[in-house]
Image (cartoon, helix red, strand yellow):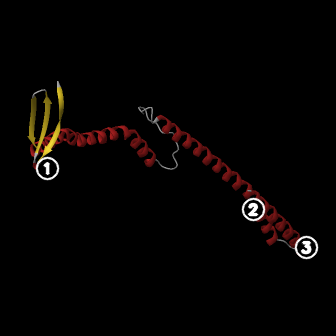
Amino acid sequence: KLLDSGFSNYGGANGWRTFTAHADNYTLQAAQPQTLRRRLAADIALNAMFPIIAIVPIGGVLVWILLGYGLKPLRVIAREVKSRDPAILKPLKFDRQPDEIAPLVHSLNDLLARLDHALKAERQFIADASHELRTPMTALQLQVDLLETAASEEERVELLSDIKQGVGRTRRLIEQI
């Protein structure tokens, strides 16, 4: 039957670590130098850290490689978009794209389609505005030509009034556009 037991330190930091156990008429005592205990603890810690120290760089390289492989489709899309001529608004085509990239490609293609539609509408507006402005400008030019060849002062006054009205109509048309 064990009556009393425990650890004790003797002699300070460079002393001994002892374990004493008392039972009936017997005493059992074991001792170990503190320096040996510290060396063993350091060896155990170093042996436990070595695999971690070796795995961290290997893991870092593996993560770098896997991220590079995983992000390759994004780099391909970025190169495709960057190399495009601004006038070419055809959809991006990627045959073997990962499922994670498909929404990005779809969104970019949707944006390109909307931009193409907006540019076509702008071109149509410019063509229509140009046509609408050519007609009154042609009429004004004809009236100026007639003014130069007018024979009487009365005819010149009438043509000048017509030119002023034409300029007013042209100004209103420009403001509407």
Residue 60, numbered label: none
Q: Pinpoint residue 152: horizontal percent, then vertical percent.
A: 88, 74
Q: In this view, does 158 lie above or below 15?
A: below
Residue 154, numbered label: 3
What residue is shown with label 2? 137
* First along the sequence among labels 1 and 2: 1
Marks 2 and 1: in contact by CB < 8 Å? no
Closer to the camera, 69 or 165? 69
Q: Pinpoint residue 88: horizontal percent, then vertical percent.
A: 51, 46
Label 2 sits on what residue type? Answer: Met
Label 3 sits on what residue type? Answer: Glu
Image quarter (top left, top right, bottom left or bottom right) of the C terminus: bottom right
Q: In this view, does 176 lie above or below 27?
A: below
Q: Residues within 10 Å of mark 3 (few under 14, many from 20)?
A: few
Q: How far apart are marks 1 and 2 (CA)?
A: 106 Å
* First along the sequence among labels 1 and 3: 1
What residue is shown with label 1? 13
Residue at 33% over, 41% down: 68
